[in-house]
Amino acid sequence: MNGTSGRRLSTATRVAAMAGVLLLAACGGPSSRPGLVSRPAGVAGPVSYQRVAIEGLPGWSTDRVADALPVFRRSCERLRAVSPNSMVGPSVWGSRASDWQAACAVAARLPAFDDDAARRFFAERFQAWQVTGAGDPTGLFTGYYEAALDGSLSPSAVYSTPIYGVPLDLRMEGGKGMRVSGGRSLPYPDRAAIEEGAISGVAPVIMWARDPVDVFMLHIQGSGQVRLPDGRIQRIGYAANNGHPFVGIGAIMRDRGLGDGSSMIAIRAWLRANPAEGRALMRENPRFIFFRPIEGEGPIGAQGLPLTGGRSLAVDPSSVPLGAPVWLATSDAHGETVNRLMVAQDTGSAIKGAVRGDFFWGSGEEALYHAGGMKSAGRYWVLVPRGGRNAVAQN
């Protein structure tokens, strides 16, 4: 995925940072229409929320809303641990965990694959709030996916690029990777040094890959499915990073006239066609990622739950609570309209701002096709259960 791994906050780090959180209470603020909520330190601009009719959301009548229902039910698993009286989201919503728990109880009883029933459920049980930042309801939406690559549990002439586990000597200090050498605490080696053998003997190799370009893309995405020679699939996910900043090579390519650089597909093609120059270019991103095996479903998002391609959205949780249904209106990497119900289940180090999201497209090449160059303007609306002040305001 994109962040602490590359651009995104990693799977394991997201889980650790957000452990036990389903619906993070955004910051409080005055009750008004629209509701204006001040942002926490480090997040630019105010965020406001305006009630709108769900039936008026763009594409509301055409989306397969039932496809989002099991995703929401999965997020409901985390809500059971939240105290019923806890406030959820900004105070203008007047929303408590008990309201969400009641909605989850109804969702659990709905029939599967019944689009009409699912649409009625969300329309009757939820209020839509449009999210606006600094007076502008339009923001940026990007895409990410789960990488797929060929690998082996043992090295060979075919499988020669290591995928490392967490080094024994890595420690994080203030977000920076450090190691002790000669009694001194020193910055952890960067990508170039690691590829030259700087962590040999102190970092386990959990797998060996066929293509170094695929491994680089894996580092950017933060999770992947590795196809083993016997046909088995082994999932791996982010475990740690070396603490160096992420540097996107697409902009470097464009600045130097090396190629398109506007999408992951174009970047990958250029790196493969220019192996020597490509290796040097990849080293200009000093961040290096360490992985761990993942058993069962995946990849794992910030709630500690498996993500669902086409229905899971990474958000800034200071604006949108994790676990909340979100109606998204944007377009994919090829300009195709995307109007659909998502669920906020992930976060990212680059996903900051009132109207900002990262669309999880799933796994493999088809997902890469949609996600690879997605950088689209769009809007979104948070769906909040009717209850408390939210219900009173509607009556």
Image (cartoon, rainbow, N blue to C red):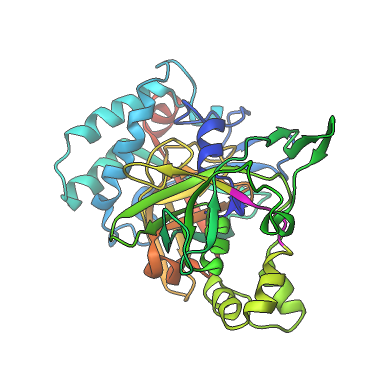
Q: Is residue 318 left or right of residue 145?
A: right
Residue 4, can we see it?
no
Which residues, given as a range, are shown in magenta?
A: 285-289
Q: Position of residue 378 (x, y in %)?
A: 53, 61
Residue name at image x 38 percent, y 60 percent: 363
Residue name at image x 24 percent, y 35 percent: 107
Q: Between 283 and 55, which is closer to the camera in this rendering? A: 283
Residue name at image x 52 percent, y 74 percent: 265
Q: Between 95 and 271, which is closer to the camera in this rendering? A: 271
Tell me if residue 286 is in the magenta stretch: yes
Residue 18, can we see it?
yes
Q: Main secondary structure of the magenta part?
A: loop
Residue name at image x 67 percent, y 47 percent: 199
Q: Position of residue 162 (x, y in %)?
A: 54, 56
The relative height of residue 61 versus residue 383 in the rendered view (above or below) is below
Q: Position of residue 29 (x, y in %)?
A: 63, 29
